[in-house]
Image (cartoon, rainbow, N blue to C red):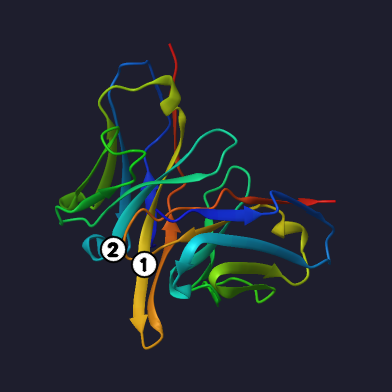
Amino acid sequence: EIVLTQSPGTLSLSPGERATLSCRTSQSVSSSDLAWYQQKPGQAPRLLIYGASSRATGIPDRFSGSGSGTDFTLTISRLEPEDFAVFYCQHCGSSPPHTFGQGTKLEIQ
Amino acid sequence: EVQLVQSGPEVKKPGESLKISCKASGYSFTDYRIVWVRQMPGKGLEWMGIIQPGDPDIRYSPSFQGQVTISADKSISTAFLQWRSLKASDSAMFYCARRDGYCSRSGCYRYFDLWGRGTLVTVSS
């Protein structure tokens, strides 16, 4: 089973700033199998990024993903008030389980 | 409208059984896998298992194998998650989600693009 480790656990930033979230996998994975989700309080997760760098439908272009091998990054170029939430990375490989990282909480400073 | 509609909140006692549901609409139910995800209070997302409706192959996370049963009834476009004997530690929010994906020259892409709103299960004596 592939383990995903996200850092930092909590990120405190202000609107307008740039956010950089990290996801490290316990073994090298295909970029096509790495996804990012956003979850706001009381809501279901929402797909942001799939294939490490492709934005899901309707996701603003301030969200971007990058990375390969074992190191992946989600970047939010200029934070909007509605962006503050918990973010999860996930490995969606051909063989389950499709594990999630433990999450990064992005909070308003 | 393409959506997954989950059954309502449940309050149960330890030892009771439970079956919660996830009804798909707006798309062909048998064309996509459905996954179940647990979220304990204040905690992260845990992948429980996945089913391809109409296919007998169901995969479980080792953490949930033997603890829950995932099933689907394609005649009513609904997936299910059930417990035979609940424990207090089963109290959580449970989400179903649809797995989508495609293959191109650069690889095969898989992701969970459609989520239900969740079913809150509370187990307390």
> Residue B107: which quarter of the image?
bottom left
What chain does mark 2 sit on? B
Name the foreground residue: A25 vs B3. Answer: A25
| Label 1 SS | strand
Q: Are discs 2 and 1 less than 8 Å apart at CB? A: yes
The location of residue B15, given as percent across then percent down, is: 31, 16
Q: Amino acid at mark 1?
A: Asp
Does A10 appear above or below B30? above
Residue at 57% across / 38% down in the picture? B43
Is disc 2 surrounded by few (<14), some (14 to 19) or many (20+) residues within 10 Å?
A: some
| Label 2 SS | loop
Q: Amino acid at mark 2?
A: Tyr
Residue at 40% across / 35% down in the picture? B8
Name the foreground residue: B67 vs B41. Answer: B67
Are the residues under marks 2 and 1 on the same chain? yes
Residue that protrudes farthest toward the front in the picture: A27
Task: Identify the residue under disc 2.
Answer: B32
In the picture, the disc for residue B17 is none
Task: Identify the residue under disc 1.
Answer: B100
**Mark toward the start of the polypeptide (2 vs 1):** 2
Q: Is residue B71 left or right of residue A47?
A: left
Residue A87 visible to an observer of this rendering: no
Residue at 68% across / 62% down in the picture? A21
The location of residue B26, given as percent across then percent down, is: 33, 63
The location of residue B78, given as percent across then percent down, is: 26, 48
Is disc 1 surrounded by few (<14), some (14 to 19) or many (20+) residues within 10 Å?
A: some
What chain does mark 1 sit on? B
Name the foreground residue: B106 vs A14. Answer: B106
Does A27 appear above or below A61? above
Residue at 78% across / 70% down in the picture? A78
